[in-house]
Image (cartoon, rainbow, N blue to C red):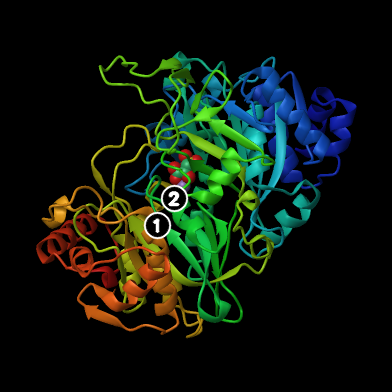
Amino acid sequence: TIDAAKAVFTEKLDAANQSKLAKISNEEALIKIANAIAMCGPESVFINTGSAEDVQWIREYSLKKGEERKLAKEGHTIHFDLPQDQARLVNQTFYIINEGEKMSSLAKSLLRSDAMAYVLKFMPSIMAGKTMMVGFYSRGPIGAEAAIPAIEISSSGYVLHSAELLYRNCFADFDKEAKRAGLFFTNVHAEGNNTPEDVPNARILMDRSWQTTFSTFCTYAGNTLLLKKGNHRFSVDYATYYKLGEQLSEHMFITGMTGPGGRKTFFAGAAPSGCGKTTTAMVGTDFIGDDLAQMWIAKDGTLRAINPEKGIFGIVEDVNREGDPYLMDCLRGDGTEVIWSNVLIDENDVPHWVGNGEVAPEKGVNFQGEWYKGKIGPDGKPVPMSHKNSRCTLLASAIANHATAVSEDPAGAPVQVITYSGRDADTMPPVWVARNMNEGVVIGASIVSKATATEVGATGVNRQPWANAPFIPGALADYMHAQFDLFNSHKLSDAGRPIMAGLNYFLTHENRGSSGKGLLGEKKDVRVWLGWLELYAHGDVKAIETPIGMLPKYEDLKKLFDGIKKDYPKELYDLQFTLYVDNIVHRIDLQTEAYSRESNIPVQLF
Ligand code: SPV
Ligand code: MN
């Protein structure tokens, strides 16, 4: 009850924090916070209002606890996760289900009684001797139709510090926003003792009925900064079941491209982790976000998108001057706060990572301890200087081409191009466009990707429907229905209906019988593929109709390559855009077979 909650606050919070919390009147929120305090048993509670003073307190708490360490550059810190906890712990992440409830074939689930047994065994007093921090955030510009507020509760200063860079603090607007949205998400994280022995006990437990996530015995942000993928899961759930045909919650970047006459065309694009989503987003002239998109059909018939985040938790491997100049300006320049994770720190407290195009140091410290050039790991292989999933956390607005005004507009950005991409070495061309909305939905349903470093234990080539599969809590068929419904909705005006396209940066020479080696393209080509889509969306170029959709003409691409001063021989175009019919038919068979095993898949897909 609210009275019991208030008694907990009187007992556990000092006067200053009691008076801060007194500004929140949402009783459900207060009860959930009190429950978390009663269960986790922290020594003290810190309410983060997002004021400069409070955020500074969090930074210092994280440094004092040793969760972060200062680097040479002002405002830069390093955080290390344990070697066992360098990516999302997929096999330790569960949806809590009730007896008889059926879940997605893609996600793990745990019976409520088993989840309860875990919580009662591991969570009582898990924050003993620590400070519990409580923050209030909006997943989107405050007041936006698809923005949902959330509470982040954690004993980790690193988590709250990251939350301040990645999400909009909405302490002052929380009551109003929870009322407007009609719901809020709650996240409770406790890292425990942060020892390797504890990691096998780590769990990320998601309770859909309470819209609450618990995370224990881990620190990697994808497992603990629950505002991100934890709440994304609830948000997918909400869009699928409560806003069917009206909203989508996607694992997508949002970016704008400037076309002829200075027109702005906004893109939203899905890609699995580690497939170039951040790079693509920053290639645009009007960068908005690199990971998540909330979309809805506005009253004027346009499709609108907001970024639930205001920052970047980006992979740093292969980020370099040539491919990612704006991000490099932030990482190597002055004036931007950066939390680094799991990179190499040299003896001058400077971070280094694989593929940065710079001279590598001889030695330093990384997530495995001391590192030196040529170090051999327990598996007999050379230890890379930085983890493949090492990251940088910073404000999106620090990126030079960030479109801050559009990003903060509660009306969102009007999306005219939707893209889907994966890591496909041998089948699909670099870019193709669906002829209608149903074909577009099929492109999203057919993403495949080679396993990347963002999920612990992932191997092989996997189907990655919409790059959103790990975050779909209900039945995949329901999510798919929601896609068909939204893109075919009569509420979308003709002008507001986006084009839908596939992108593939990972086609190799070897797979096209060419004598060349490696990829058939390079990072800077992304500009051309996006540029061509921008023109095609406005009918400024014609395309070649094929059974997989519309393909660009050589002449149009050549002009765009001339614009980036890159040679584009016809032979390369032929290697990239020749349709390998056997491969495509094989891919279709694989997808058809896999989807035939699911129940209730919409007939349009087949
Ligand atoms: C991803 O892996 O898709 C990420 C990072 O964006 S994580 O927070 O781990 O999900
Ligand atoms: Mn992601």
Q: Nearer the viewer, residue 110 or 354?
A: 354
Residue behind mark 1: 524
Q: Nearer the viewer, residue 191 or 187?
A: 191
> What is the spatial separation of the Cα atoms under label 1 and label 2, in whole angstroms?
6 Å
The reply, left or right, for residue 99 in relation to residue 550 is right
The number of discs equals 2
Query: In the image, which disc is placed on residue 323?
Result: 2
Q: Earlier in the sequence, mark 1 or mark 2?
A: 2
Query: In the image, which disc is placed on residue 39?
Result: none
The residue drawn where x is 70% and y is 27% is: 132
x, y percent for residue 601: 29, 63
x, y percent for residue 491: 52, 81
Amino acid at the residue labelled 2:
Gly
x, y percent for residue 320: 46, 43
Q: Secondary structure at mark 1?
A: helix
- Occupied quadrant, residue 442: bottom left
Quadrant including the C terminus: bottom left
- Occupied quadrant, residue 9: top right
Task: Tell me if mark 1 has few (under 14), some (14-19) or many (20+) residues whose alpha carbon lies within 10 angstroms of its own.
Answer: some
The residue drawn where x is 63% and y is 26% is: 71
The residue drawn where x is 45% and y is 26% is: 85
Residue 581 against residue 391 in the figure, above or below: below
Task: Tell me if mark 2 has few (under 14), some (14-19) or many (20+) residues whose alpha carbon lies within 10 angstroms of its own.
Answer: many
Residue 235 against residue 22 in the figure, above or below: below
Quadrant including the N terminus: top right
Cβ atoms under marks 1 and 2 closer than 8 Å: yes
The reply, left or right, for residue 290 in relation to residue 597 is right
